[in-house]
């Protein structure tokens, strides 16, 4: 099994944040812009069999207030728009997981950005302080209450995902709701007043009863299901007894040979290739000298 890269890592568009407060420049950019249209399920609605994006002026000659600026590439603007703002029927709709596999990396990254921001907008209709209606501002990146003036902004939910090992064995768990035979790394959301490193240690202990000795950041992945950011860590823990919480159906230590054999025999399945979880597992299975040094018992 090879180490496959994971989805949504492309740098994406130049997000052009300063332009969000300049309506005249946004209007000018609309003339040759393209749109990524999403339906209520967060699926991308393709313009045609060969085109992902809608030509902006085919939708409206003037920029709608509901159009969210995603950014620029080679001088061309890309906006996101909910399907209910269009009269045009889409050719087909595609989910984010399928697009991550089928689309070019940049387009998949743009989809991830659009899905997260439009989900936030759909959930941000009313003020959390006075209950008043919110109006979208700054090209879709803020919402301001018409009553009390409170401004709200998109919130990303950070979560940690941990490759827990003693160097020779990897800790994997499974939840009852997952597909049969599916095992993955332990993960959990960062709580208020907590660093991701603290979360990594706490979540492993809470879910498996395993005490982690140290952690090291590896990589991160935006995870628009709908608005998470997965922060990946290597976590060193001496092999020890497992005591699972009610969050897991099971958890086990696997050696490299055992894990490879179970996957080859189709007795165990790993997470989808688009996920950082799969990447971290494969990276451990193919540990190079730099990675292996972390698992040495020296601190």
Image: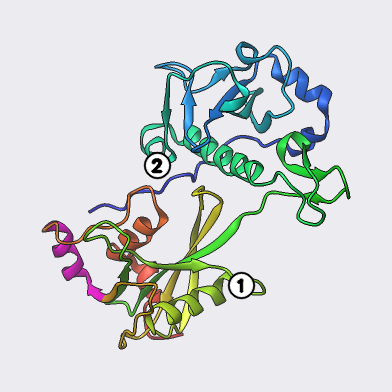
**Where's residue 154, x and y in %?**
68, 49
**Where's residue 281, x and y in %?**
33, 62
> How would you rate the neighbour count of disc 1 (Cα within 10 Å): few for under 14, some for 14-19, many for 20 or more?
few
Residue reaching furthest front? 131
Distance from the alpha carbon under mark 1 to that under mark 2: 29 Å
Q: Looking at this view, is 102 or 57 the one in front?
A: 57
In the displayed structure, 52 sits above or below 292; it is above
**Where's residue 250, x and y in %?**
28, 74
Q: Is residue 16 left or right of residue 188?
A: right
Residue drawn 26% across the image and 60% down it:
182
Q: Is residue 117 left or right of residue 147?
A: left
In the displayed structure, 160 sits above or below 67; it is below
* SS label for mark 2: helix
The prevailing secondary structure element of the residues shown in magenta is helix
Residue drawn 80% across the image and 23% down it:
25
Residue drawn 16% across the image and 70% down it:
258
* SS label for mark 1: loop
Circle on res. 147: none
In the displayed structure, 144 sits above or below 256; it is above
Q: Is residue 202 left or right of residue 122?
A: left
Splitting the image into 4 quarters, where does residue 78 fall?
top right
Lower position in the chain sequence, tag 1 or tag 2:
2
Which segment is the magenta one?
Answer: 253-264
In the displayed structure, 4 sits above or below 158; it is above
Residue drawn 59% across the image and 26% down it:
84
Which mark is nearer the camera, 1 or 2?
Answer: 2
Circle on res. 195: 1
**Is residue 263 found inside the magenta-colored segment of the image?**
yes
**Is residue 66 found inside the magenta-colored segment of the image?**
no
Q: Is residue 110 left or right of residue 176?
A: right
Q: Which residue is mark 2?
A: 97
């Amino acid at each position: 099994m090879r180490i496959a890269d994971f989805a949504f890592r492309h740098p994406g568009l130049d997000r052009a944040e300063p332009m969000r407060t300049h309506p005249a420049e946004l209007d000018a950019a609309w003339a040759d812009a393209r749109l990524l249209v999403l339906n209520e399920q967060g699926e991308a609605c393709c313009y045609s069999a060969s085109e992902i994006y809608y030509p902006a002026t085919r939708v409206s000659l003037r920029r709608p207030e509901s159009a969210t600026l995603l950014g620029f590439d080679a001088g061309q603007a890309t906006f996101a728009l909910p399907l209910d703002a269009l009269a045009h029927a889409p050719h087909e709709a595609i989910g984010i997981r399928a697009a991550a596999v089928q689309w070019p990396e940049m387009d998949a990254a743009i989809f991830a950005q659009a899905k997260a921001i439009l989900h936030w907008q759909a959930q941000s209709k009313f003020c959390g302080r006075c209950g008043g209606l919110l109006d979208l501002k700054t090209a879709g990146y803020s919402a301001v209450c018409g009553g009390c003036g409170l401004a709200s902004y998109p919130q990303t939910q950070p979560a940690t995902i941990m490759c827990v090992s003693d160097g020779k064995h990897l800790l994997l768990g499974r939840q009852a709701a997952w597909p049969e035979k599916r095992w993955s790394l332990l993960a959990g959301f960062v709580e208020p007043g907590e660093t991701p490193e603290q979360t990594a240690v706490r979540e492993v202990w809470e879910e498996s009863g395993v005490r982690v000795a140290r952690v090291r950041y590896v990589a991160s992945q935006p995870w628009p299901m709908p608005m998470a950011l997965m922060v990946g860590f290597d976590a060193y823990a001496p092999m020890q007894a497992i005591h699972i919480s009610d969050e897991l159906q099971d958890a086990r230590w696997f050696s490299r040979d055992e894990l490879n054999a179970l996957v080859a025999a189709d007795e165990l399945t790993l997470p989808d290739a688009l996920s950082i979880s799969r990447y971290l597992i494969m990276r451990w299975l193919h540990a190079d000298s730099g990675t292996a040094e972390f698992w040495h018992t020296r601190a």
